[in-house]
Image (cartoon, rainbow, N blue to C red):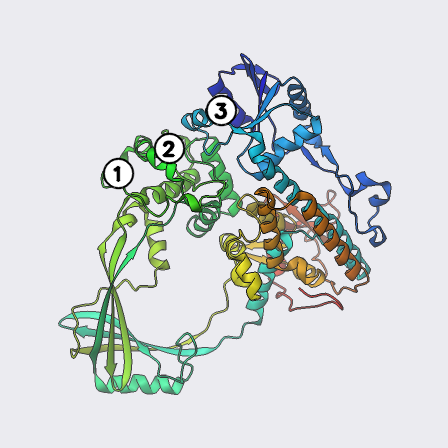
Amino acid sequence: MRVFLCEKPSQGKDIARMLGARERGSGCLSGPGVMVTWCIGHLLEAAPPEAYGEQYKRWSIDQLPILPDQWRIEIKPKTADQFRVVKNIIGAASDLVIATDADREGEMIAREILDYCGYRGPVQRLWLSALNDASIRKALASLKPGQETLSLYYSALARSRADWLVGMNLTRLFTVLGQQAGYAGVLSVGRVQTPTLRLVVERDREITRFVPVPFWSIDATLAVQGASFNAQWIAPPGSHDDAGRCLQQAIAQQAAESMRRAGTAQVIDIETERVREAPPLPFDLGTLQEVCSRQLGLDVQETLDIAQALYETHKATTYPRSDSGYLPESMFVDVPTVLDSVLKTDPSLAPLIAQLDCQQRSRAWNDSQVTAHHGIIPTLEPAKLSAMNDRELAVYRLIRSHYLAQFLPHHEFDRTTATLTSGNQSLQAVGKQVIVTGWRLALNEAEATDAEEASTQRSQVLPPLQAGLDARIDHLDLKALETKPPRPYTQGELVKAMKSVARLVSDPVLKQKLKDTTGIGTEATRASIISGLLARAYLVKKGRSIRASDAAFALMDAVPPAIADPGTTAIWEQALDMIGTGQLSLDTFIAKQSAWISQLVSQHRGTTLAVKLPPPPTCPQCGAAMRQRGGKNGAFWSCSRYPECKGTLPVESTAKKRSPPRSRRGASTSA
């Protein structure tokens, strides 16, 4: 009997339908010679330290480091019943097809079960990029040999074991050190979560340390032949910073007075350049999360959940956990079918689709840029918009617009720069005139505004100008301004920072190594990392922004620099990719990780930490001390007498009373 092992029940039902497996069983569907069963995510999990010895039940520095010789996994209690179903079905299999998600975590979900159950039969791999019927049929007709994706399992196993080594050893180490310093909480350390948290802590410290610098600007309203346009004063050399901001008030005031006396400005030079902008690529998950955070106000986990629903439930878009916005060249033959599907899904698009050139190959079609997954695009079959909620519909439209944009012309505009002089002062006017709207026709209003704001060009259209022409100065606005502190991260901006970590690394050799890596975490894990930091109360939501809590500052002051360094974890991700492509062995990687953990424990076991935090607030109902807890909406303060007293406070209300602490380093540690 052939067994298909899927990742989720919904996925299993879709595949079973295509196989004709309609007979329902306990946790499975069966048909002639075939059975489809499914996991519920991971059915197995890494065993905790105490599984390796009774001595590890007590947290003690003397027991560290904990370095398993033989790694153990255990059945997850919550899904033990489904594991038993899967185990029995695998035991009856003559051959097996792995049909979990097409990535390294999906590979691990299946392979760890096969290893645990001792399965030794033939293995094939179903590699799906979409769950619509046409895509499933196509994938079923071209099953991959199991050996072809085995290295992905080793990569996921390496990730899991590295996370365990860091989390179990360093969380215990720094929690015990913290307790010795009088801190009662757990100092949770993670391979990815800690450097991610550092990004927010460092940004908040920049904001705290920021000292505004005053500067002055002059905006001029000019008129020529009855038409008005705006120009900006150019500060003379020696009076401005690197950004061109005038730092000397007297010079700005003298310039304004000089131009007022002159009354006119003469055009000295005119330059016009035709600019052609290619359409944006189809979305990868990280970029989709950035855009949805900025335009729709969605948390990164919300965006992932919606994209997963569009893929699994609505069959409207392809696999969401992609780190590439490019498309395989072989998929170009599907363009007419996809466009027909989009039109049937939403007939109101007929005028736009009539303008598309389905023979046009944009830069998106590039095999060399496609990783394990391609960009997120609409599927080959129509979807039901009426079945989507408002948020799902908004995200679907974003994904759809970026695909349709590939078949429209470049966006073209003329950028005109005029240089003028008035009273020995220089002015500059920049104009933009759209020549071809092109791919921006596919964008909705919010996207179009977003694209315009991202452009460095001003939206004004300059009147006809030529050298020697005089323009009347109708108004001068001398502005006293101040430099602004960095903005707090939003979740979308944090995802972007995690992806582009290379620009935050100063070491030139390391920076170059990071140029082509995925940064901190992966497309599949970044949302859960941020959600985990919120649940642990290390991050706090403030509107659309996220800020570091006092506990986060304490943690950054406790852990060694290497653990919090974004460059370190990005190098690890590079190593995991090498395992996935067979360039590095699992055993070699884990041996290096174990040696490194041993070194860190040895270096820091005698460290004295300075991690004392302000006292917790008192309960508004009974006056007892409160403690932070994690909930589905993030951290909050709960009465220490819960459940007898159910008093709560939002973390934000207490955080407002305390400014983020400045750097507070321990004797032998740094952030």
Indicate which disc, 3 or 2, sits on the residue closer to the N terminus. Answer: 3
Mark 3 is surrounded, within 10 Å at the Cα level, by few (under 14), some (14 to 19) or many (20 or more) other residues, namely: some
Q: Is residue 380 left or right of residue 202?
A: left
- Name the residue tied to disc 2: 385
The three-letter code of the residue at mark 1 reads Ile
Extreme-front residue of the structure: 583
Q: Secondary structure at mark 1?
A: helix
Which of the two marks, 3 or 2, is nearer to us in this view? 3
How far, Cα to Cα, is label 3 from label 2?
Answer: 20 Å
Instruction: Report the label total.
Output: 3
Q: Quadrant of the C terminus?
A: bottom right
The three-letter code of the residue at mark 3 reads Asp
Mark on residue 14?
A: 3
569 relative to 351, above or below? below
- Name the residue tied to disc 1: 353
The three-letter code of the residue at mark 2 reads Leu
Image x and y of residue 6, in percent: 56, 27
Q: Secondary structure at mark 2?
A: helix
Extreme-left residue of the structure: 225
Can residue 386 be seen here? The reply is: yes
Q: Nearer the viewer, residue 147 or 294?
A: 147
544 relative to 26, above or below? below
Image x and y of residue 386, in percent: 38, 31
Q: Nearer the viewer, residue 431 or 348?
A: 431
What residue appears at the point 76 percent right and 64 percent down from the top-left corner? Answer: 609
Is there CB contact under 8 Å for labels 2 and 1?
no
Q: Quadrant of the N terminus?
A: top right
**Which quarter of the figure has residue 151?**
top right
Q: Secondary structure at mark 3?
A: helix
How far, Cα to Cα, is label 2 from label 1?
Answer: 18 Å
